[in-house]
Structure formats: C-alpha cells, structure tokens
Amino acid sequence: MHLAVVSNWYPDGRANSEYGPHLVESLRQARPDCRITVLAGRPATSVDDAAGVAVERAWRHGGVDVAGDLVRCVRRLRPDAVLFNASFNAWGSNVSNLSAFWGMARVARETRTIVLLHYLPQTLTGTSRYRLAPWHHIGIHVACMLAARAHAVAFTLPRDVAYFRERYRSAMTLHMEHGLLGPLGEPGFEEADGAPTLLAFGYWGPGKSLEGLIAAVRRVPGARLIVAGASHPRFPGFLEALRRRVADARVTFEGYVEERDLPALFRRARAVVLPYESDSGTSGVMHLAAQHGRAIIASDLPVIRAETARLGLQVSFFRDAANLEARLTEALDASRMREAGSANLSAIQGLAPREVGERWWQLIEGQRETPMSGPLGVRQASR
C-alpha cells in the first residue's frame, strides 16, 4: 500500500503543519510496512526527512494552480490512496484555497481520496467569532461541495459530521479522533519555588481572552502564569502587542516552544487554561494538556463541554471573569490538581497514535463499510 498525504509540514508554521507529522506518525506506527509520501507546499522551510518519511514539495503555497500541481504529482506517483490533511485557510490565499479543494475533487476521480477537515466555519460558536465577508461564505460552501466528492470526509468533531452529512450528502461522512500529539506524559508537576503555576498555550488572537486571563491571575495571590506560543498567522503581532502592555513578574512569556520542549513546559504547570471566547474546532491544546497529565480550566463553550464529556475528561469550566478567578483559586489546591491531571491522563490513553492510526488505515483501505461501536467508531452516511 502506498499512501500520499497532502499536508502543510512542521515546522512551516502554517495551518495544520504541526498536526501533519503526528497524523503520519500514527499511520506509520499502525502499518510500518506501508509506504507513505507527504505532498507538502513550496517554498520549503522545514527539514524534509524530519518525520522519517519521503516529503515532496508538490504544490506552491499561495499559488493559483494548487489543483494542477496536486493532480500532476498524484498521477506521477500513482499512490493507492490520497489523504488530505486540510482546512479552509491552509493553502495561502483565497484563490489557492479554492484551487486545493478543486484538486481534491479531481484527484478523487482517479484515486481513492479521503479528506480530513479540521473544522467547519458554519458550526463555530462563541462571543468572538472571526468575521467573514459574503464571498468567503460562498467560497466555503463551494469548497465543501468539492470536498464532498471525495470517497470519505472525516471530522474530529461529531457536530461537524452531523452538519456536513445533512448539508452536503457526501458518500461517507464520519468522525475520526484527533488523537494524541506525541507520547503520554506524567501527572506530577515541577514548580519553581513551589508557586502555583498555570499555563496558557497556543496560537493567540482575538478569539482568546488572554488579557482577561492575565487580569484574573493578578487577582489570585501567589499564582503565576506562563504564556507560551505565538501570534495566530491571521493576526501577526497580536501577542507581541499584548506583551508590551503587560508588566508583571508573575506573568512569563515563553514565545514559540519547539515540540521537543513541550514535556518540560507542561511539567512546570499544575493546570492548563483555555480562555477561549470562540471555538475553532477540536482543541489540540486540550488534548496536549490531558496527555501530559494536567488539570484543565476552560471557557464554558458547547464544543468543549461536549468533547470533554465524550472523552471523559475532568474540566473546571468558567463563564465570566469572577467565575474564572474562582477556578484559578481552586488551582491553589495542589492535590486537587494532581488528581484531576491523573484522571485526564487515564482518560486520554485510548487515543494513542497506533490505535488512531489503525482506524485511519481501515478507512483508507475501504474496510469500514458498516458502523462500529465505541468512541472511535465510524458512522456511514448514504446519499
């Protein structure tokens, strides 16, 4: 079996680029004898053998003919199947994004094609949603119609499955687990001077109330906050501007953290805070927090409530500033945070890369023609 995976590639810093190698690694662990070729974008800013797989720079990021580039490369390689690790802003411009979805439909005419969409803009919720122009909504609708021509369309959130299945009637629309982003960690934490330390991690922009979190931490005696990550690509300079406004010894800005340094970063915190004002699909940070054995404090958004209940995670929710302060005060209880972190680590163990990868291969090879039970099950939709 030869599989081509179309994806941005770490550390390019583009949409889905961090997730791409983890998806490929789960596939490799499940089927080490299968051949995998990654079709990534140009120009290259990463080491092409970083994940130990062949990487071809097959399409130009921001190019007008991403579809043509992909079709030509697939025809040359002649893989048995193609898996797209996709989102609506992964390709560099409005034209290139739409061209990429046209490429999915064209590839599906000749090769078994599976599309993983990380989110649907139509289903996002929250008080601070990204504003889209009317033509963006039209483009998203057209892109969805093109993606629906693939042999299967997968989402990491059940709500997106339900919407896409109802609206676009693809041959098979299904839920696949996000999975872990690396090996499991440990529930214990190592805090400097024993001070209660909280972690806020991710790509930062207007949809996350980081300034509100900092203000709440300041009102909790003795608490410290580590802010790690970078400005969201759509909002360059956002985090840097906030950092200039904040001058507090109890708030540390770590900047972008390399994947190899993530375990050490999470060990420094007793809880991870998700101060989201709007959701943007599956929270990779929530999965990271759980797999490193951290307690989780999160905004009370429907998607986070649904996912934590489905996965069996222990999460302390907050609805407003006063509620957030109360949740942060609870984090002063170290034993309580250890207990919650251990419970989250235990709950997430079933999403190990090899197990998730095996389910992907069953889909890629066309073995999953009937529903399967359990949280990792796939549900078939008929036209």
Image (cartoon, rainbow, N blue to C red):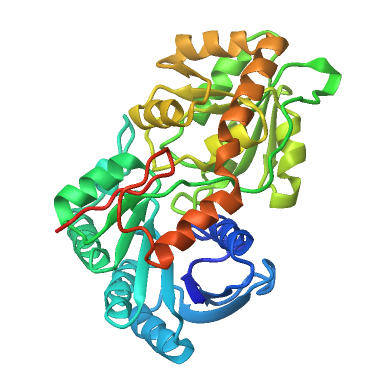
Task: Say which quarter of the image contains residue 373.
Answer: top left
Measured as percent of width and height from the top left, residue 18 is found at: 57, 56
Residue 216 vertical position relative to residue 190 in the rendered view, above or below = above
Relative side of 17 to 107, left or right = right
Q: Is residue 215 visible?
A: yes
Relative side of 14 to 89, left or right = right
Q: Residue furthest right?
A: 193
Measured as percent of width and height from the top left, residue 219 is found at: 60, 10
Residue 221 vertical position relative to residue 150 in the rendered view, above or below = above
Quadrant placement of the C terminus: bottom left
Between residue 303 and residue 360, name the one nearer to us. Answer: 360
Kindly identify the residue that appears in the image at 22 percent across and 53 percent down: 381
Relative side of 294 to 161, left or right = right
Kindly identify the residue that appears in the image at 48 percent across and 87 percent down: 77
Task: Say which quarter of the image contains residue 199.
Answer: top right
Q: Is residue 64 visible?
A: no
Kindly identify the residue that appears in the image at 40 percent across and 47 percent down: 156
Measured as percent of width and height from the top left, residue 338 is found at: 69, 18
Residue 327 vertical position relative to residue 362 in the rendered view, above or below = above
Residue 252 vertical position relative to residue 354 in the rendered view, above or below = above
Between residue 215 and residue 115, name the one nearer to us. Answer: 115
Kindly identify the residue that appears in the image at 36 percent across and 32 percent down: 303
Measured as percent of width and height from the top left, residue 352 is found at: 60, 45
